[in-house]
Amino acid sequence: MEATDLRRAWAPRFTRRAAGIQGSVIDSSTSLLQRQTHDVIPFAMGSPAPDAIPTEAFEELGRAVLHAGGAGAFGYGPTEGERALRSALLDSLATEGEEVEPDRLLITAGGMQGLDLVCKLFVDAGDLVVAESPTYTNGTATIASYEGNVLEVPVDDDGMEVDALPELVRADGRTPRMIYTIPNYQNPSGTTLSLPRRVRLLELAEEWDAVVLEDDPYRMLHFEGPPPASLRALSGDAARVIAVHTFSKTVAPGLRVGWIVAHAPIVERMIAAKQGMDTCTNVFSQRLVAEFIVRGLLDAHVERLRRSYREKKVAMQSALGRFFGDVEGVSWTDPAGGLFLWLSLPPGSDSTALFPVALEEGVAFIPGSAFSVGGAFRDALRLCFSYPDEERIVEGVRRLRVAFDRTT
Amino acid sequence: MEATDLRRAWAPRFTRRAAGIQGSVIDSSTSLLQRQTHDVIPFAMGSPAPDAIPTEAFEELGRAVLHAGGAGAFGYGPTEGERALRSALLDSLATEGEEVEPDRLLITAGGMQGLDLVCKLFVDAGDLVVAESPTYTNGTATIASYEGNVLEVPVDDDGMEVDALPELVRADGRTPRMIYTIPNYQNPSGTTLSLPRRVRLLELAEEWDAVVLEDDPYRMLHFEGPPPASLRALSGDAARVIAVHTFSKTVAPGLRVGWIVAHAPIVERMIAAKQGMDTCTNVFSQRLVAEFIVRGLLDAHVERLRRSYREKKVAMQSALGRFFGDVEGVSWTDPAGGLFLWLSLPPGSDSTALFPVALEEGVAFIPGSAFSVGGAFRDALRLCFSYPDEERIVEGVRRLRVAFDRTT
């Protein structure tokens, strides 16, 4: 049977939820870019720079983990996470003034598994989930994989337009089951939810008795001082707020280590769910991250990342000014942290059509429509400034302009 | 609010599927055993022996991976898996006479994620799934987490009693959507599905148009030559047969690396689903396993494991003869491979009540009822012989008898 026939033959056998499972344009770009044989400057994946990954430290730390733990570093670990990482994390949270009880902490396989766990426990088929628009593709994909429906709320310079939310909810007719938000240096827009809006969002969550999924991968990567207090803190640690974090942007994505802070009965149920998902998180990786924290390397490392990414952001903005300053209708955001710029092209532009041309010219990005379940933002795109060095950033933006000219 | 109040308050807010999510007694035992302060001989987790984990090789291989890949060894990887591991695996399958096209292979975070992916795509709420009884707790837990219903089919020395299956299905009234089987050295019974039964099971799957989930973690760990041909091979690689494998038992469980072989359109959909689950599998671990295979270390390692586990099985059986030979109604299985023995106690025994007493005496196992959704097998238990050395195996069985005498 031909592949297309097979696809047709098997489609009806997939589950109902399978229909909602969409591949991630972002994740697929890793594979796509690795297949390119010419030089492509990657503004696509939200990856730390190669020199932002502490490989030399890892070599030393890896040896230490091996010698201390022996075979145990490669055995099964407790589902809730390795003791060493849990206590390192609780200590460092305490240093930041956050006292978290051990039974409120769960180690996950990156932030993505955190999102999956929350949706698994709180999104039933047909539930309404509020989310920023644009927002993280994989977040809404996970909601859709549990047959939830996303209500897209526009974003401005202060993050989600929370004041518009009640009217949007009324128009939908359903009461939201969950609010999914990336409050800091949002992916993909780079915007940060203002303090008054955070407070208002929590009031609305209370009114609707909705769960708040606070997806917070970029909090530590601030350029102008820390962001406003987290929704979790502002809520007085209400049970309804579940915070999902990751070491992917501050230590290394390929280690797949993240964590969740939630109320104990929720964490307890999440542990049970995770046992049916992957048994436990990679043990060696957890111990490596623990060692990185315990030796006091994380703080200095994050401080270096802040400086480096701030400089790269400025370099990208200045290159955008240089190469797109003459194009009417082009604008870009000014993130106060994180990895991403959001570039708006002149109305009527098509970033999906621009993509293959840009790839040919040697630059990659993520088309805007990937960040909307309704396929909005065709005239926008996400640029990640963290990975290439400043020279390559300038060259990448130059190539982008060449591609832009070829398609207009 | 007290924890119990909170649990009550939040229970109605969990999804319907959350009700089906049960923690794994097996996985929880890792955490439980780590908390013990006295000496406990672990017959509980299905873990490789400490000296069966090639830590010394890992140190050398880890260095090689780091030097070859640099930061790339810790970056995001393609969701379908690292190129190095994929090609090492395809090559070694080819050597065994199995030509698998690259688009039919998916690398997963251990075998457990493989089971989760298959259930996500093929189990809808209310679907009937056939499984061995007893069977792997986490397998049926995952089915339940997608609101599938398990039809338990008894096991004898030749594996699932396939001839009894049509009548059991008729009695249920539904047509099975999926057949979940562990054909080789089954967890927990240690039995192997005979060739005629494999053929018959595939006929029934054809008749019912059911998916066959072939969970095959132990295939390579044979003591008396390879097991019968896989269901996938016997089916002529039919689309309905999906094979889930893992390196957890042959290389190291803490690395969380496994793989799936399925038809390309199914793998394509699984890649999309995995992007919403954990983005990609741990990159460093994948490259470590690839290096282990490419350097030709896997085959010799597996051969050592076969010899060692066979000796340990014999040691456990002889200890059982020595310490339980005088107890009427006690019997145990004789696995031709794998990690597990199934011990039947005299009718009316209660292995769940035996557990805490055994733990006190310094030996751990998994109570039989963990392996049945209906809570059968209270008078049986699973013993894993792979982890302790032979002397400790004898001592563990001795302690088990002491505990047994204390409870009868």
Image (spheres, coloured by chain):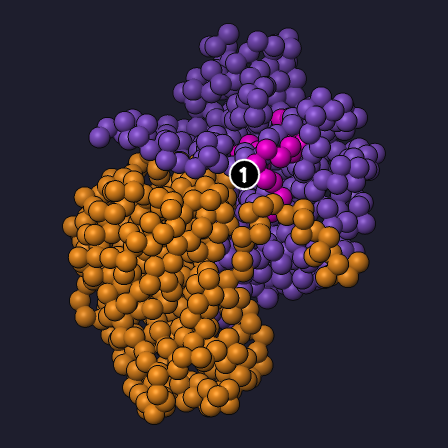
Chain colours: A orange, B purple
Mark 1 surroundings: few (<14), some (14-19) or many (≥20) residues within 10 A:
many
What's the amino acid at mark 1?
Tyr
Quadrant of image for the N terminus of chain B? top left
Q: In the figure, is residue B212 to the left or right of A127?
A: right
Task: Verify whether residue B133 appears in magenta.
Answer: yes
Image: magenta residue range: B121-141
Q: Classify B228 as above or below B319.
A: below
Element class at badge 1:
loop
Q: Is residue B259 left or right of residue A238?
A: right
Residue A335 location in percent, x, y?
27, 72
Tell me what residue is drawn at x 51 percent, y 37 percent: B145
Residue A261 falls in which quadrant of the image? top left
**Residue at 57%, 61% in the rendered image:** B81
- The foreground one among B295 and A171 is A171
Which residue carries the number 1 mark? Answer: B146
Asked if B1 appears above or below A3 in the picture, the reply is above
